[in-house]
Amino acid sequence: MPKEFINPPTLSRPTGYTHVVKVGNTVYIAGQVPINARGEVVGVGDAAAQSRQVFANLEAAVQAAGGTKWDFVSIIGYLVGREHLPAYREARVAFFGENPPASTLLIVSGLAQPELLVEVSAVAALG
């Protein structure tokens, strides 16, 4: 089955990876961090703002593959510190509503850049 590698202009320019890989109706989305399309970190020190940007990036990624946020079947979240969990959960509920996908959450000691507090990777099944 052919793979389609997608780096939409609605997301920051990746360095050494692809944001979205589509294989048939399955979409694999690399960990999205709170960086906007201009390459700027959004919400430095603010887990709520960072979480909202991460979910906006996930939506942009799945849309680039022809899907919607309702096509997500699995997400894996990474938080730098347990204290950010309420803000992350609030953003996740606001994004997915009452039917969220399967979800795993890890508390980690750090992400790729020190100002990043939240990262989420995802899998979507289109149609």
Image: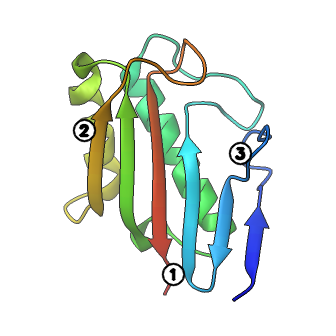
Residue found at x 54% / y 78%: 26
Q: Indicate the position of residue 120 as horizontal and vertical percent values.
A: 45, 43
Judge whether 24 appears above or below 83 on screen.
below
Residue found at x 57% / y 71%: 27
- Judged left or right of residue 89, residue 20 is right
Q: Indicate the position of residue 68 as horizontal and vertical percent values.
A: 51, 70
Q: Indicate the position of residue 72 as horizontal and vertical percent values.
A: 42, 67
Which residue carries the number 3 mark?
A: 11
Which of marks 3 and 2 precedes in the sequence?
3
Residue type pointed to by label 2: Arg
Residue 92 image-quadrant placement = top left
Q: SS for tag 2?
A: helix
Which residue carries the number 2 mark?
A: 89
Quadrant for the N terminus, please.
bottom right
Q: SS for tag 1?
A: loop
Residue found at x 74% / y 47%: 17
- Judged left or right of residue 125, residue 89 is left
Q: Label 1 neighbourhood size at 10 Å, few (<14), some (14-19), many (20+)?
A: some
- Judged left or right of residue 49, residue 9 is right
Which residue carries the number 1 mark?
A: 126
Q: Report, in whole angstroms, how far the alpha carbon at label 2 lies from the one at label 1.
A: 25 Å
Q: Report, in whole angstroms, how far the alpha carbon at label 1 lies from the one at label 3.
A: 20 Å
Residue type pointed to by label 1: Leu
Q: Report, in whole angstroms, how far the alpha carbon at label 2 lies from the one at label 3.
A: 23 Å
